[in-house]
Image (tube, helix red, strand yellow):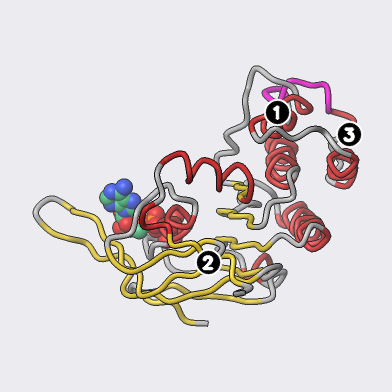
Amino acid sequence: MSNAIVNLRQVSKGFNDGDKYHQVLNEINLCINRADTVALTGPSGSGKSTLLNIIGGFEFINQGELLLNSSNTANWQDTHWSQFRRQHLGVVFQQFNLLTPLNVRNNIAFSLRLNQQRWTPWCDYLIEQLGIKDVIDRNVETLSGGQQQRVAIARALAHKPQLLLADEPTGNLDEKAGQQVMALLTLLALESQTSILMVTHSNECASFMQRRWHLEQGKIHE
Ligand SMILES: Nc1ncnc2c1ncn2[C@@H]1O[C@H](COP(=O)(O)OP(=O)(O)OP(=O)(O)O)[C@@H](O)[C@H]1O
C-alpha cells in the first residue's frame, strides 16, 4: 500500500478574472508521504494558498486527480471532506480562527469534541511545550498575537493529525519568536508523525523543513 498521504496528479487550477481565465496551477504532480515536512515558497500570487486550499478541500481542482490516503477525492461529498478534515487534518492559517468567546482550553477541547475525541496527556504536553499553560483559562481574545498563534498550533496538533497545512504560521511573530515556534512545531509534528506542508516567505522558517518546493508560473520546482 502507498505511503502517500497526499498525491496530486496532473492537477490544474485557475480562476475566471472578468472575461479572462487566469491559470494558477498547471498540471502539477506532487506527493507528500507520512512524516514528510515541506516548505512551500514562491512569489506573491503564485498560488501557494490555492494549493493548500485544494488539499484541504476548500477549493476544487479543474483538472487532474487529488488522492488523499490513496482515495481519489473526485467523488467525495461534503460529509466525506468534513470527516477527512476532522480526523486527519490540522490547519494553521494566518488568521488563527480561534473561537473568541472561549478560553484556551475550550478552544482545543471544542475542536477535539467535533471528532469525538477527548483531552489526552498529549494535549497537556502540547500546552506545556508551547508555553501557554499559564494562560489556559484565559479568553483567547485577551492573549497576544504570539500566544494566539501558539494556541492555534496546539489546537491543530491536538488530535495528532496525519497532515498539518500551515500558511505563514509564524507571520505575526518577530524573528526570534518565529524561530522558536518553528523549532517547537517541527519537534511536536515529528513526535506525532504528522506531515507538514507550510507556506512561508522566510528562508529561516523553510530551513526547518526537510524538503522545499518552489511554486512559480504554475509549476513546482523541488
Ligand atoms: N477565489 C478566487 N477567485 C479568483 N481568483 C483567485 C481566488 N483565489 C485566488 N485567486 C487568484 O489566484 C492567484 C493565486 O492566489 P494565492 O492566494 O493562491 O497566491 P499566494 O501565492 O498564496 O499569494 P501570497 O503569497 O500573496 O499570499 C492570485 O492571482 C489570486 O488573485
* Residue 195 in the image: above or below residue 19: below
Residue 82 falls inside the magenta stretch: no
CB-based contact (under 8 Å), mark 2 and mark 3: no
Residue 150, image x and y in percent?
74, 42
Residue 194, image x and y in percent?
71, 60
Distance in Å between CA atoms under marks 1 and 2: 31 Å
According to the picture, the residue beneath numbered tag 3 turns out to be 133
Q: Write down the region rendered in magenta.
A: 136-142
* Residue 140 in the image: above or below residue 204: above
Distance in Å between CA atoms under marks 2 and 3: 38 Å
According to the picture, the residue beneath numbered tag 2 turns out to be 70
- Dot 3: element: helix
Which quadrant contains ligand 1? bottom left
Residue 177, image x and y in percent?
77, 52
Instruction: Indicate which disc, 3 or 1, sits on the residue closer to the N terminus.
Output: 1
Instruction: Indicate which disc, 1 or 2, sits on the residue closer to the N terminus.
Output: 2
Tell me where residue 196 sits by quadrant. bottom right
According to the picture, the residue beneath numbered tag 1 turns out to be 107
Return the residue nearer the eye: 207 or 101: 101
Question: Viewed as shown, does residue 112 lie left or right of 71?
Answer: right
The image's mark for residue 46 is none
Question: Viewed as shown, does residue 50 lie left or right of 94?
Answer: left
